[in-house]
Amino acid sequence: MTMGVQSSLLKDSRFKAWEPVLWLLAFAAPALSPSHALIINEIAIVALFAVSLDLILGYTGIVSLGHAAFFGLGGYVAALFAKLVMPDPLVGLAVGMLAATLLGALASFTVMRGSDLTRLMVTLGVGLILLELANKLDWLTGGADGLQGVVMGPLLGRFEFDLNGQTAAYYSLTVLLLLFLLLRRVVHSPFGATLMAIRDNRLRAMAIGIPVNARLAASYTLAAAVAGAAGALMTQTTGFASLDLFEFHRSADVMLILVIGGTGWLYGGVAGAIVFKLMQDAISSITPQYWTFWIGLFLVVLVLVGRERLLRPWTWFKRPSGGGKA
Amino acid sequence: MLTLLFDGIAYGMLLFILAVGLAVTMGLMNFINLAHGAFAMAGGYITVLLMQRFGVPFLVCLPLAFLGSALLGAVLERTLYRPLYHKPHLDQVLFSIGLVFMAVAGVDYFIGSTQQIIQLPEWLKGRTELGSDGWMLGMGHYRLFIVAVCAALTVALQYLLTRTRFGSQLRASVDDQRVAAGMGINVNIVFLSTFAVGSGLAGLGGALGAEVLGLDPSFPLKFMVYFLIVVAVGGTSSITGPLLAALLLGIADVAGKYYIPKLGAFIVYSLMIAILIWRPQGLFVRKGGK
């Protein structure tokens, strides 16, 4: 009996056969088609960002509209570190993550209380404060012009960042893989199970002795660290940091990405990032200025029709069966 | 000093008119609507287009802006919003962000991304100064007009909510939807008309505020935060809460930008976070209710 429960609980955490194949394909992609290395790099970064949001949105149930705060902070810190202290990318990545972790730990106090609306507001507020800071501290960050002149050193002292972006793509993919595996381990651990318990019913979670606030703080901080890593990768591989990193639409986009791919399932962030980036690329090559309209329309349709039904066209003309609950 | 206070009050009153509809819809339907600014923008553009293309006088435009936005609100409520009342908040957030994106890009496409300018009538342009030296009070006539209109609207709203039959139906629906429906109140109609009036007020606010706040396609995104602050800080259970929150926000914003321009909007956001951590349900919460 115990064995049965245990194995069914462990079933989800086992690696499926397609997982290594997916990662092998991802790592083969920049070599197979070097001209797409830049967009592969971008997809890897956005996927990492979306996966970090999944930890707090999908697993812990916090609706955040300010996740770009951590992304931007990681990015700016990594870029400033490269410019002012030393150009080594790995140390810069660690410093960027550290900064985002600290901010995450601090900001985690703001998401413990209140309703969804309150949390939405404070996360949004934190993002806006950082945007204002980056804007006003122009002697440090370059203000609205962005931070220019970031020159990265070679990776591991050997691989230079080239214009084609192949090094960048491998760098981002590797970081994505490592952090993904870490998060995969975390969400399938007992710790991850308590997060889902909090998401599903906070009161009951408290009643069975889960320290709700401590778990919320831990997951929020971890998500902030990973988002900071994504931001650091972004500025390191592009050699540029601008206010755009903190913008509201970035938080909104990443939420959309996660919803496309599905929340509460780490691969959702990865799948969503691929779909979103390819879609963005395609639409903005047709109408560069108005592509947000189509993204908006997509969001509205997605919510009204429902993600499940939108992805399964064959259910469109069926009547909802039985209990009426989809 | 007094001038600043006056400007802050005018700004706050304007924010209140813009956001009060949001407060009521959020409190009533528990719906997180980030697209409220889009209705305000609609009102603003109705006014601008009517004045520029058809030469309609400003004062006639204001009620038209109200009606236009209210109609838009009613149509959208019936077609798009209603199915989402019982969906999770995440869906509502995504849906309304989508609407905002569409509104921003759509206006950009049809009207252009330039800032729109409203030609005020002559009698609203001047400025009156009272007192002297340190206690001088300079009042722009237009701001005085805004304060007067908004104050009148506030009184009217308060009357509507507390003294009329519709007001008691609305309050009953806010407190407990199911019981209200059981008592024979047609909750759907109450929702629809409230949403329409709220959108209309936002449209009116957008028309009034086009001159003060500036009007361009990014309006709903730029002021979304301000509306949400008013609602989150003021609470959603009465209209006095949002009114006080809006005034506080208006004064803090104007004074902050004047005295410490370096910090900009910083003060407002920090204040909001501090208040929300201190009292997550908002500053002015009525006891009881649901």
Image (spheres, rainbow, N blue to C red):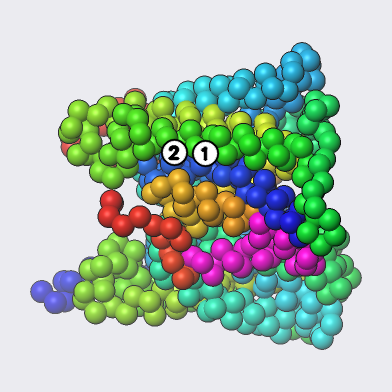
* Residue A265 seen in render: no
For mark 1, does the 10 Å Cα neighbourhood hold few (<14), some (14 to 19), or many (20 or more) residues? some
What residue is pinned by disc 1?
Answer: B154
For mark 2, does the 10 Å Cα neighbourhood hold few (<14), some (14 to 19), or many (20 or more) residues? some
Secondary structure beneath dot 1 equals helix
* Residue B27 seen in render: yes
Task: Name the residue rendered at 78%, 59% in the picture.
Answer: B135
* Closer-to-camera residue (A37/B37): B37
Q: Which amino acid is tagged 2? A: Gln
* Closer-to-camera residue (B278/A167): B278
- Determine whether label 2 and label 1 are within 8 Å by CB: yes
Task: Name the residue rendered at 56%, 34% in the picture.
Answer: B152
Quarter in which the C terminus of chain A is drawn: top left
Q: Main secondary structure of the magenta part?
A: helix
Residue A24 percent coordinates (x, y): 56, 64
Exactly how many numbered labels are in the figure? 2
Is residue B271 in the magenta section? yes
User: Magenta stretch?
Assistant: B251-276
Residue B25 percent coordinates (x, y): 43, 40
Which chain is mark 1 on? B
Quarter in which the N terminus of chain A is drawn: bottom left
* Closer-to-camera residue (A207/A240): A207
Q: Quadrant of residue A207?
A: bottom left
Task: Name the residue rendered at 37%, 41% in the picture.
Answer: B28
Secondary structure beneath dot 2 equals helix
What residue is pinned by disc 2?
Answer: B158
- Asked if marks 2 and 1 fall on the same chain, the answer is yes
Q: Which amino acid is tagged 1? A: Thr
Q: Residue furthest left?
A: A1
User: In the rendered view, would you say B52 is above or below A217?
Assistant: above
